[in-house]
């Protein structure tokens, strides 16, 4: 059987296909079908000839096999220095081999490639900063994911995720009505405590257009309310779009470049429609990476920039604290030792390390850096979609060890983790390894410590 | 024989070397694609140039990057090997004498003793590089026979030159072998991993532009390599 | 008065007493009952795993699992479902308080019923209690309709209630709870006990108030009750007023016991207390845990006044 019913080379673009996939318990049938899936070697080679160009080919060719990238990869460290986890090996044994064989690889090989691309690399790009030639194995394994996706070799959850983006323009099944209703609901629920609180939808020419991670409206709408309260306290003129509000991109994790384009274009369309001055993205690392850093390229924007200037939430918070729009009550600053999880996606790969330090200088009295940190931080262990892939749960849990040891070494019991996936990974690492830490996003932490001027408080009758 | 290898064959190999590298350069640059590489090479140029220069500069400085500092031993090995490998032939007395004879100009030259030490340094560094390749599992797994071949091509001119200079055995034999191995190296540069002679700079510049333009360079002080 | 009832269950013995009341109300009031269970808490980032609410284990969610939980709910409530005419079962994934609030809002329900756990010796009680406790707090605070929390077997049918105690601290939410209690009292013909406790520790912790000061407070409270509430009773005269001094939750419990209350109604006035930190710390929860009758928490006016039909 070349093409499976669930596992095949087609994209998921109808609700029927999506529901069929969702009904498959843990992707059992899906993965069974994958074992029989044919590799379209011609198409694979054609893609390579077209898209594997001088940059990638040079990287593959000039790699000196020096192994300087080995210790940069947390998978290598977490797996007791298993040589098979050396970044260079991971790419040479996959992409390098496919090219050597001119695309003529079989099913077994492709499944090995899939395992490598998703369970041995979270595309954190740390290795790129340790290779003397600047060979970026994260970029290459991301590229390999694209090849795998086109051939149907992609983890079940990510096939679903990319399908969600194609159907709902969001990583979860949330319709425009659901979203707008959630905004109203949250404003309703919190306006009693915060008189005048609003979540304005589709306001034109606002200063800020705010966009989120679909898991917020779906399961944690408080997050949206908290953002609203902080904007309200800071006196921002802001809005959310009724459509194009989703920043994240499981399609990027999946290597479904078509869906990536569809997704970011929905956000850019909202910018064009509402003409805000700038965009602020919620506390999500890969969302920022997808929509702000890589997105313009998928959408073919020659400037390489989003239609309006875009900021990560940490940039907004740092600015609000710097300009005094938000003031921290000195008595409520964090006294205990606290550390900060640098998200690869917006720190190493978008240069926002300074914002994080600036924020911490306002809120914490005993801030402790992890080592290494900033651009050289290790991935939390759950990036690149790994957190969500059931098949690779064990590999993910092993990978968490590096972050666990880093956190332990700081002596901090509290980790500030302004990235949904990092937050999750840290929660899971506490669950798996029980090291007695707590973790938080910025919003709830800030809400607990900002000064609230009298006129923002509800009037008792 | 000596006449032949230092005459027409030398011209040929230099020709292949330069044309090959030129081809590499053109091929590399033409193969870049802003959308596929996701770097706007021709927009935000100033950020790109800054990123590229930083990326090359820090990596040319011994211990200039986190990575160099992380592997101090290997870093010393790499820098000694490369500096000696490049400097010795260019500033060697013997080569410059030839240069003067044939083209009427020469470069400053190294004292003979120092050149000798540097030649030895290349050879010794190569030996350690080989040992490291075999000893460390994370390097062994990457190693292919090809890697030894490339190293051999690079070190052969030094070994033969050293033997010729010290007149171990037949000078005539070693000197021809020396010139030949040098020419093999020149020819091999564009066609093997030795192309990193040029591609190191291009690849580093490319990643530097990536960081300088897209991955934060427009918002921070530049990647802390 | 109760057309739609939402019974938020944990599908475990802790909810048995609450379940009886929920089904009883459904029949007596001809209401629609939705038996609602939130089974797994999803994570913040991308993941298809959820934390099972009951076991704390990680589970991968699929329709089978949800069906299986629904099936299990059917078994748990088999006896009660037998006589039920208008009830539905629903199991969903999400954060419990959030999904309960979402459902209540979407269906515009008139009452939410929840069970509470009171026995420490049960397996997993501590963990369980913290989930249930914080869920209860959050639901009670934000729900637009009354939330009734039942921890002990309820002997009296609601239609036969004879004493309803409403505790007030004169806050805005308390007005809502008073109005709803009055509405219920009228409907079932029960006696309404308006109660206020002068908190002797409130003003300055550690400093106990003098007798004269307390007297003055009591007098002031009585005036307030007159002004604020009595005028709104509009002809209903089956009420009495009780004012005590002490620690509010102790006093209201004592009062309810004396009056043989069938129901305690109060507002959830814990804005300053973070429910995560002050588990079971609020007055409402202290009352819930110790009360022998159900406790209704009413904080919003939405369902307090009879809709004009
Ligand atoms: S550090 Fe760079 S050159 Fe060395 S093995 Fe790794 S990828 Fe290859
Ligand atoms: S990108 Fe990160 S996870 Fe992937 S190989 Fe490089 S260091 Fe390892
Ligand atoms: S989950 Fe966080 S740490 Fe991991 S790759 Fe993403 S941003 Fe980096």
Image (cartoon, coloured by chain):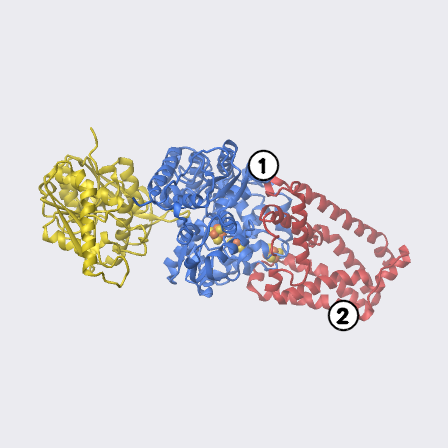
Q: Secondary structure at mark 1?
A: loop
**Colour chain B is painted in:** red
Chain ID for yellow: C
Element on which disc 2 rests: helix
The image quadrant where one finds the C terminus of chain C is top left
Tell me the quarter of the image containing the N terminus of chain C.
top left
Q: Colour of chain A?
A: blue
Please indicate whether residue A293 sits to the left or right of residue B160 in the image.
Answer: left
> What is the spatial separation of the Cα atoms under label 1 and label 2, in whole angstroms?
55 Å
Q: Position of residue C2 (x, y in %)?
A: 18, 37
Please name the residue that numbered disc 1 is placed on: A301
Asked if both marks, 1 and 2, belong to the same chain, the answer given is no
Q: Position of residue B182 (x, y in %)?
A: 78, 58
Are dots 1 and 2 in contact, CB under 8 Å? Answer: no
- What residue lies at 9% left-to-right and 46% top-to-bottom? C156
Residue C176 visible in rendering: yes
Q: Which residue was labeled with disc 2?
A: B117
């Amino acid at each position: 059987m070349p093409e499976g019913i669930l596992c095949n080379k087609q994209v998921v673009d109808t609700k029927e296909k999506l529901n069929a996939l969702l009904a498959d318990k843990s992707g059992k049938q899906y993965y069974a079908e994958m074992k029989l899936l044919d590799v379209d070697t011609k198409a694979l080679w054609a893609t390579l000839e077209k898209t594997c160009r001088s940059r990638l080919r040079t990287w593959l060719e000039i790699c000196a096999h020096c192994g300087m990238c080995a210790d940069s990869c947390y998978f290598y460290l977490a797996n007791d220095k298993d040589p098979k986890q050396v970044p260079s090996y991971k790419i040479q044994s996959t992409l390098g081999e496919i090219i050597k064989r001119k695309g003529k690889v079989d099913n077994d090989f492709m499944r090995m490639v899939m395992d490598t691309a998703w369970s041995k690399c979270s595309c954190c790009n740390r290795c790129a900063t340790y290779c003397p030639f600047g060979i970026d194995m994260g970029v290459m394994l991301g590229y390999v994911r694209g090849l795998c996706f086109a051939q149907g070799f992609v983890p079940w959850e990510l096939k679903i995720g990319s399908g969600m983006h194609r159907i709902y323009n969001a990583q979860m099944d949330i319709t425009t009505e659901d979203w707008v209703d959630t905004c109203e609901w949250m404003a309703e629920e919190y306006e009693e405590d915060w008189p005048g609180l609003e979540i304005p939808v589709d306001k034109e020419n606002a200063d800020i257009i705010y966009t989120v991670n679909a898991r917020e409206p779906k399961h944690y709408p408080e997050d949206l309310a908290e953002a609203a309260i902080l904007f309200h306290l800071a006196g921002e003129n802001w809005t959310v779009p009724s459509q194009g509000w989703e920043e994240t991109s499981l399609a990027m994790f999946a290597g479904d470049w078509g869906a990536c384009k569809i997704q970011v274009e929905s956000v850019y369309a909202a910018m064009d429609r509402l003409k805000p001055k700038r965009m602020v993205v919620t506390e999500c690392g890969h969302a920022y990476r997808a929509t702000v850093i890589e997105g313009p390229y998928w959408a073919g924007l020659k400037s390489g920039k989003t239609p309006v200037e875009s900021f990560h939430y940490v940039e907004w918070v740092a600015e609000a604290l710097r300009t005094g729009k938000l003031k921290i009550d000195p008595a409520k600053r964090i006294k205990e030792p606290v550390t900060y999880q640098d998200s690869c996606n917006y720190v190493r790969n978008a240069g926002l390390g300074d914002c994080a330090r600036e924020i911490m200088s306002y809120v914490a009295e005993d801030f402790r850096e992890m080592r290494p940190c900033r651009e050289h931080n290790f991935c939390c262990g759950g990036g690149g979609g790994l957190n969500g892939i059931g098949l690779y749960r064990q590999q993910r849990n092993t990978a968490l060890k590096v972050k666990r040891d880093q956190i332990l070494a700081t002596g901090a019991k509290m980790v500030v983790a302004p990235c949904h996936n990092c937050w999750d990974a840290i929660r899971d690492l506490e669950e798996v390894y029980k090291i007695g830490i707590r973790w938080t996003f910025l919003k709830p932490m800030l809400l607990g410590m900002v000064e609230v001027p009298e006129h923002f408080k509800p009037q008792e009758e | 024989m000596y006449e032949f290898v230092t005459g027409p064959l030398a011209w040929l190999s230099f020709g292949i070397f330069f044309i090959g590298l030129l081809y590499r350069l053109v091929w590399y640059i033409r193969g870049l694609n802003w959308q596929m590489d996701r770097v706007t090479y021709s927009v935000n140029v100033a950020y790109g140039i800054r990123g590229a220069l930083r990326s090359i500069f820090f990596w040319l400085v011994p211990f200039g990057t986190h990575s160099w500092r992380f592997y101090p031993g290997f870093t010393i090995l790499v820098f000694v090997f490369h500096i000696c490998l490049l400097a010795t032939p260019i500033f060697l007395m013997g080569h410059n004498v030839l240069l003067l004879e044939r083209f009427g100009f020469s470069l400053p030259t190294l004292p003979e003793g120092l050149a000798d030490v540097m030649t030895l340094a290349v050879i010794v560094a190569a030996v350690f590089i080989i040992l490291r390749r075999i000893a460390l599992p994370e390097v062994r797994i990457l190693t292919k026979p090809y890697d030894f071949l490339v190293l051999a091509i690079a070190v052969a001119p030094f070994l033969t030159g050293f033997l010729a200079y010290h007149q171990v055995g037949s000078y005539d034999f070693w000197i021809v072998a020396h010139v030949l191995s040098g020419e093999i190296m020149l020819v091999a540069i564009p066609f093997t991993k030795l192309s990193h002679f040029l591609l190191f700079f291009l690849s580093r510049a490319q990643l530097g532009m990536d960081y300088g333009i897209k991955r934060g360079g427009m918002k921070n002080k530049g990647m802390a390599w | 008065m109760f057309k739609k009832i939402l019974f938020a269950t944990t599908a475990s013995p802790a909810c048995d007493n609450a379940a009886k009341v929920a089904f009883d109300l459904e029949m007596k009031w001809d209401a629609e009952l939705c038996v609602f269970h939130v089974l797994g808490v999803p994570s913040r980032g991308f993941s298809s795993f959820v934390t099972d609410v009951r076991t704390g284990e990680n589970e991968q969610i699929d329709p089978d699992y949800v069906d299986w939980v629904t099936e299990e709910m059917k078994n748990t409530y088999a006896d009660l479902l037998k006589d039920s005419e208008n009830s539905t079962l629903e199991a969903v994934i999400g954060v419990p308080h959030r999904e309960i609030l979402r459902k209540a809002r979407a269906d515009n329900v008139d009452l939410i019923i929840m069970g509470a756990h009171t026995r420490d010796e049960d397996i997993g009680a501590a963990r369980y209690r913290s989930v249930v406790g914080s869920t209860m707090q959050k639901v009670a605070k934000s729900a637009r309709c009354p939330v009734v929390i039942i921890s002990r077997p309820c002997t009296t049918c609601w239609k036969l209630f004879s004493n309803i105690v409403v505790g007030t601290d004169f806050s805005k939410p308390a007005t809502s709870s008073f109005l709803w209690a009055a509405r219920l009292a009228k409907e079932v013909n029960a006696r309404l006990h308006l109660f206020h406790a002068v908190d002797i520790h409130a003003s300055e912790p550690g400093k106990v108030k003098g007798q004269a000061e307390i007297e003055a407070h009591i007098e002031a409270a009585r005036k307030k009750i007159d002004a604020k509430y009595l005028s709104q009773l509009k002809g209903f005269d089956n009420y009495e007023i009780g004012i005590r001094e002490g620690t509010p939750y102790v006093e209201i419990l004592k009062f309810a016991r004396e009056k043989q209350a069938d129901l305690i109604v109060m507002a959830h006035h814990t804005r300053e207390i973070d429910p995560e930190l002050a588990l079971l710390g609020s007055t409402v929860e202290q009352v819930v845990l110790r009360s022998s009758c159900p406790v209704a928490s009413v904080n919003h006016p939405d369902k307090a006044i009879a809709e004009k039909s």
